[in-house]
Image (spheres, rainbow, N blue to C red):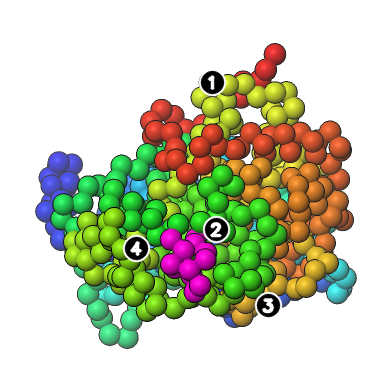
Amino acid sequence: MAWALVACLAMAPVSAAALRVRWMAGPDPLAFGRSRVTHTAGQTFTVTRWDVILSGIAFHRPEGGWITRPDWVAVFQGGAGPESSRLAGLPPGTYDRVRFQIGLSPEMNRRDPADWPPEHPLNPTLSGLHWGWTGGWVFSAIEGRWSVDGRDDEAFSFHLATDALRIPVEQALVFDPADGSVLEVILDAAVLVGGAEPLVLDRATATTHSRPGDPVAARMATRLREALRLVTVRPKEAAPNPDPGPADPASRRPGTARDAHPFRLVIPATFPRPALPLDNPLTEEGVSLGRRLFSEPMLSGNTSQSCASCHVHDKAFTDGSAVSVGAFGSAGTRNAMPLFNLAWKGAFFWDGRARTLREQVLQPITNPAEMAATLPVVIARLEQAPARPGYAEDFRRAFGSPEITADRIARALEQYLLVQVSGNSRFDRALRGEERLSEQEARGFELFRTEFDPVRGLRGADCFHCHGGALFQSQRFGNNGLAGKAPDRGRAGVTGQAAHEGLFAVPSLRNVSLTAPYMHDGRFKTLAEVVAHYSHGVSPSPTLDPNLAKHPEGGLRLSADDQAALVAFLETLSDVAVGSSGSGRGGSSHRQPSIRTAP
């Protein structure tokens, strides 16, 4: 009988269940960084982040039996990611119950994060909830500010994790995906902090990292379950919701030369799988053309400057200046960003205004303060370039015909930049047992991946919250407490939202010893100055990242020895050959590494 049921399900048509999340503040939508929720004890809360992982999703038939699939996992990141998820392969019909858990099974929680496909919600590049070098996943991250009676805001940061804090959810409802219904998960901030026993915070209870026996974590897990409810949203008119299946990759690959040779991108074993553009496959010819264009001064208005002028290979593709100077001598306002491991980035520029590399690469060419050219002029110059060989032949080899267009220039530059992979530093070799870190460097790594939580006896540097995992970066934007210079709106200049004032992209710390000066405006000349900033120079502001705002006034107050240890560790992240395609994929990822130290 069990075999017959499986066979029938396998032969049955399938549809896709639509799962959506909606964040609320009581009766109103929750506006991250803006909505204010005040409970009966007089504390006011503003939520800036609310992320959850849902797994074990299953649907119950009225006649009995649960339908589930192991790949039904949803990750929702409030204000920073998609608000809906598609659960493919659900047989059509009516369901009367839904269940899932907030969190992951022990097996999934311990799985090597580098194994997940690039499109899977648990790929660390997409989710941002893998705990990096500390191992496992944060099942829910809830961050923001709180205040009492109008006094200065304090920060809260609740990171719920570990097998003991998985939160089961099961609810009766009627759901039929075939009629276009959407299963909606509602997360209510007013319930999270309010209720008959409101959440009353002080400095000792405003943060948790889910250490064993932590009562704050257990209390927040209970509140999270209470703040969640499920509803079915039905359309006014029924609409079919079939599962179309995966798109044909070949249909998204226009313009590649038929005889072009695939480029073999080698990915370090600890890195997540990147989501490379299917409509611009990497080829030897495309990468070669992109490399040539990257160093081509004809891309600038006065033919004096190339992309490589401000992104120097030996400086990890930066230029060593606080701000770059354009082709006609105009000084920019921001520091040149490094250009490696971009295959794992989801937004580009300090303010994230470009969503793809293809969009990003043309903007410096036409920016009047940078290369100050126009695309028609650039195209005409490339068309008229002398042979040896001419650009027309390079474009034919890469794209199948000699036409030179702005789109093809962008595609070639995109291909070249996507293959700049850096993952073979002294730190990586120490992970593989090929080298040893000094005691000071190992101490720096310990500080890097340890929380600053004195109430629970932890006095680390908390670096991993923003620079976690093998890439040492985050897809999110953050305000790290800079002050004292002319204001730069950062992300708010793109979104127009006050909650994004002073937020900038979080860059990778790989090769950081090569990319001085530091910060978006190049204000710090040395790594020692950067570490000193986080130790005692953090300036408060309404948008300061909660993981910094929870620290004592000014910063971590690290000792001189600990600051020196952090600098020593950061210097181990420099690659022997920046711009190479890294070490080969294979072997195991090091989620909880064992570092060899020098005797």
Q: Which residue is drawn at 53% across and 47% down?
A: 313
Q: Residue at x 80, y 68 (%)?
A: 485
Mark closer to the chain start, 2 or 4: 2
Q: How far apart are marks 3 and 2 (CA)?
A: 35 Å
| Cβ atoms under marks 1 and 2 closer than 8 Å | no
Identity of the amino acid at label 2?
A: Ser
Relative to the observer, which residue lies in front, 577 or 394?
A: 394
Mark closer to the chain start, 3 or 1: 1
Q: How crowded is mark 4: few (under 14 residues within 10 Å), some or many (20 or more)?
A: many
| Cβ atoms under marks 3 and 1 closer than 8 Å | no
The secondary structure making up most of the magenta span is: loop
Q: How far apart are marks 3 and 1 (CA)?
A: 47 Å
Q: How far apart are marks 1 and 4 (CA)?
A: 39 Å
User: Which residue was labeled with disc 1?
Assistant: 433
User: Which residue was labeled with disc 2?
Assistant: 309
Could you tell me which secondary element the residue under label 1 belongs to?
loop
Relative to the observer, which residue lies in front, 13 or 462?
A: 462
User: Which residue was labeled with disc 3?
Assistant: 498
Q: Which of marks 2 and 4 is in front?
A: 2
Q: How far apart are marks 4 and 3 (CA)?
A: 35 Å
